[in-house]
Image (spheres, grey):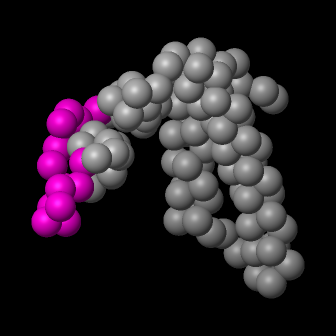
Amino acid sequence: MNYVYESFERGLWTVGFYGPDGKFRPEADYTDQVAAGQRVHFLNGGSAALVDDWRVQLSAANDETRAMRALVAEILADFWPGERFEGISEGLRDAQARVDDYRKRAGLERQS
């Protein structure tokens, strides 16, 4: 049996495992994805080295989010000059805020 974490609702990660019948068996809930990942790693026999791996992944996610925001802004400006896309930019800002929150919880400084 391997433990996993799933997000069944926004902002909440549930650690657990899938039984032989295919049903998810929860072990604990976390509001922090990093903590959920660390718990899964521990339950599956891992060590504290995961923290460094999460830092690398979060750094990459932050870079990807910034690049995505810039690319979407370019595409929108090319196809619809002068238009405002509040919903899209709000969603991207929300994604960036979540990445920044994960980075803060993992002890990383945000790179400008």
Look at the picture and state if 82 lies above or below 62: below
Residue 51: horizontal and vertical position, in percent?
57, 22
Residue at 78% from the left image edge and 27% from the top image edge? 111
Whether residue 85 sits left or right of residue 68 in the image: it is: left
Residue at 61% from the left image edge and 44% from the top image edge? 96
Whether residue 66 sits left or right of residue 48 in the image: it is: right
Residue at 77% from the left image edge and 82% from the top image edge? 80
Whether residue 102 sits left or right of residue 60 in the image: it is: left
Residue at 69% from the left image edge and 50% from the top image edge? 65
> Which residues, given as a range, are shown in magenta?
17-30
- On the question of residue 32 being in view, the answer is no
Whether residue 22 sits left or right of residue 30 in the image: it is: left
Does the magenta portion include 31?
A: no
Look at the picture and state if 36 lies above or below 18: above
Residue 48: horizontal and vertical position, in percent?
52, 16
Across the whole image, how many numbered discs are drawn on residues? Answer: 0
Look at the picture and state if 76 lies above or below 98: below
Overall secondary structure of the magenta section = strand
